[in-house]
Image (cartoon, grey):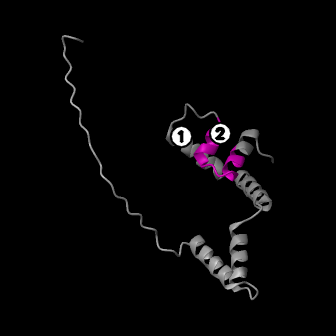
Amino acid sequence: MALTAKQEQFAQGLADGLTQADAYRAAYSASKQTDATLWANASRMASDSKVIARVAELQSALADKQLWTRVDSVTELADIARGVESKAAEKIAAIKELNLMHGFNAPTKIEMGGVLIHRIERVVIDPCKA
């Protein structure tokens, strides 16, 4: 059994990375619904087996179209880092990039200095001139 047009639009929204609520808003007229009702309807729609299957199908198609993935980056950098023909500088650069990608570097602390000036202005309104 095929999805309705609105179910398809909802599934495409989920596959594109929208939240359930945002995908539901995009597919259905939900402006008069309370947040609780909208969230319940979006959750119910997202748990529908036909919608789940369609989202998985769309995500798989998107993954096939990606030109470069994180896995591709890690694989290539690891090959450079371990490569016999790679120069020392290339190996070091690849290892640094891998460490950065995986969050192995310590957070960078930024020192900020300066003077903060507060200005308080008192305005007296003359009721006779108003």
Asked if residue 33 is positioned above or below residue 49 in the image, the reply reads above
x, y percentage for residue 75?
72, 76
> Image point 54% across, 34% down: which residue?
33
Tell which circle, 2 or 1, labels the residue nearer the N-terminal end: 2
At label 1, the amino acid type is Thr
Q: Is residue 35 left or right of residue 56?
A: left
Tell me which corner region of the image, top left, top right, bottom left or bottom right, holds residue 27: top right
Considering the numbered disc 1 on the image, is that residue within a helix, a strand or a loop?
helix
Q: Which residues are magenta?
A: 10-28
x, y percentage for residue 5?
76, 39
- Residue 13 colored in magenta in the image: yes
Asked if residue 89 is positioned above or below residue 49 in the image, the reply reads below
Q: Which is more toward the observer, 108 or 2? A: 108
At label 2, the amino acid type is Ala
Q: What residue is pinned by disc 2?
A: 26
Q: What residue is pinned by disc 1?
A: 37
Mark 1 surroundings within 10 Å by alpha-carbon count, few (fewer than 14), some (14 through 19), many (20 or more): few
